[in-house]
């Protein structure tokens, strides 16, 4: 693991925030698909956000289309889950399926940009490396690079795990305020370790995790212990795991931020405890440096990517 102390930072690219959505003028002779896209863009605009949705008449005015045609299109989009209609105001707004698709698109783009770095970390540490995001209150591994060792930790790509049981999960919520953490813990603080199916490779080898963390290894027992762990993460800039999820496996995770300073992902390196020994904090500091590099690639400032305590206090 001598390579853990040799790590070259890459210069950040020039990034700018996405431009706000624009309202489109109607194209009366365009196809039905184009019409539906116009409607979705209008419902994603500033006026719809400020008014908590728009009615059929206003959508027709903004798209320059016939009210009857717009009404039928909105009904079709609602059936597909792309828009929702408030039963009281009857206003339409973007549906949950749009946000789900946007999140998956963002995850795909994130994985693409992070892939070279994730493989470089795995090559440098010679240990399995993961890129994780928060989805539905739990942790989804979107990218894994396996250790070259025959004896190694498992690739978790495509698997969702309970956030409270993993260092990546705890890192991903470490910039939340107290009330957000309380609401999250009430809903997810006792989730099963694996949320959803295993990937085919893990299922084929009969992979299993501990149903409960050993009492002397568990970091989270209740909401108070969650707050302590979050403060610990903010102070150090990384979280660790010591046989909480799998016997003989340790790991470290650190937060990745974007240009807004918000935590959008976590980098995790996991390994057999027999190889890491008493160097888990060394690994944690290495992963923190690597996560700061990816943060800068995503447009984060150097200060925001290296100051988890400040991020937590700001929220």
Image (cartoon, grey):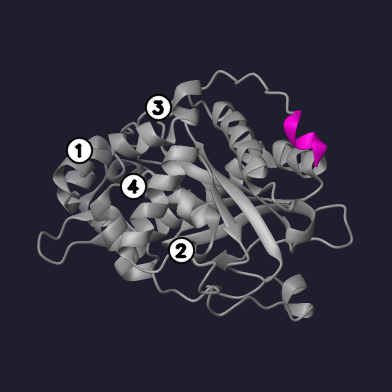
- Name which of mark 2 and mark 4 comes first in the sequence: 2
Above or below 6: residue 112: below
Tell me residue 217's x, y (percent): 54, 67
Residues at discs 3 and 1 in contact (Cβ within 8 Å): no
Instruction: Give the spatial CA distance, label 4 vs label 3.
Output: 26 Å
Instruction: Give the spatial CA distance, label 2 vs label 4.
Output: 14 Å
Residue at left offset 17%, top offset 49%: 52
Circle 4 — which element? loop
Residues at discs 3 and 2 in contact (Cβ within 8 Å): no
- Name which of mark 4 and mark 3 comes first in the sequence: 3
Q: Is residue 291 magenta?
A: no
Which residue, given by chain and number where applicable, does mark 1 sit on?
Answer: 47
- Kindly identify which numbered label has been placed on residue 95: none
Please name whichever residue, 111 or 154, is drawn nearer the observer in this view of the structure. 154
Apparent side of residue 84 relative to residue 125 in the rendered image (left or right): left
Please name whichever residue, 42 or 153, is drawn nearer the observer in this view of the structure. 153
Instruction: Give the spatial CA distance, label 3 vs label 1.
Output: 16 Å
Closer mark to the observer between disc 4 and disc 3 = 4
Residue at left offset 49%, top offset 30%: 305
Which residue, given by chain and number where applicable, does mark 4 sit on?
Answer: 176
Tell me residue 68's x, y (percent): 23, 56
Tell me residue 232's x, y (percent): 43, 46
Apparent side of residue 182 relative to residue 132 in the rendered image (left or right): left
- Name which of mark 1 and mark 2 comes first in the sequence: 1
Closer mark to the observer between disc 3 and disc 1 = 3
Query: Which residue range is magenta in the image?
Result: 1-6
Which residue, given by chain and number where applicable, does mark 2 sit on?
Answer: 164
Instruction: Give the spatial CA distance, label 1 vs label 4.
Output: 28 Å
Which residue, given by chain and number where applicable, does mark 3 sit on?
Answer: 19
């Amino acid at each position: 693991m001598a390579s853990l102390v040799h790590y070259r930072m890459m210069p950040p690219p020039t990034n700018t925030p996405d431009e706000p959505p624009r309202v489109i003028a109607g194209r009366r002779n365009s196809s039905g698909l184009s019409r539906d896209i116009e409607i979705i863009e209008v419902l994603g605009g500033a006026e719809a956000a400020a008014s908590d949705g728009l009615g059929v008449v206003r959508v027709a005015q903004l798209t320059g289309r016939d009210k009857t045609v717009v009404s039928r299109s909105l009904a079709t989009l609602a059936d597909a889950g792309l828009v929702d209609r408030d039963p009281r105001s009857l206003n339409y707004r973007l549906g949950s399926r749009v946000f789900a698709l946007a999140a998956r698109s963002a995850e795909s783009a994130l994985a693409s940009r992070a892939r070279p770095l994730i493989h470089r970390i795995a090559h440098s540490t010679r240990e399995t490396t993961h890129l994780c995001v928060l989805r539905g209150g739990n942790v989804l591994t979107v990218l894994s690079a396996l250790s070259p060792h025959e004896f190694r930790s498992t690739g978790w790509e495509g698997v969702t795990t309970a956030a409270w049981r993993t260092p990546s999960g705890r890192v991903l919520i470490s910039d939340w305020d107290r009330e957000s953490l309380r609401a999250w813990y009430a809903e997810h603080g006792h989730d099963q370790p694996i949320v959803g199916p295993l990937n085919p490779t893990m299922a084929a080898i009969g992979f299993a995790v501990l149903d409960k963390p050993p009492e002397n290894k568990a970091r989270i027992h209740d909401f108070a212990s969650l707050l302590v762990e979050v403060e610990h993460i903010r102070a150090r800039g990384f979280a660790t795991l010591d046989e909480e999820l799998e016997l003989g496996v340790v790991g470290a995770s650190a937060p990745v931020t974007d240009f807004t300073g918000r935590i959008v992902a976590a980098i995790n390196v996991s390994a057999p405890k027999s190889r890491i020994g008493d160097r888990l904090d060394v690994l944690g500091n290495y992963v923190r440096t690597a996560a700061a590099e990816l943060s800068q690639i995503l447009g984060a400032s150097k200060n925001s990517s290296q100051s988890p305590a400040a991020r937590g206090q700001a929220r």
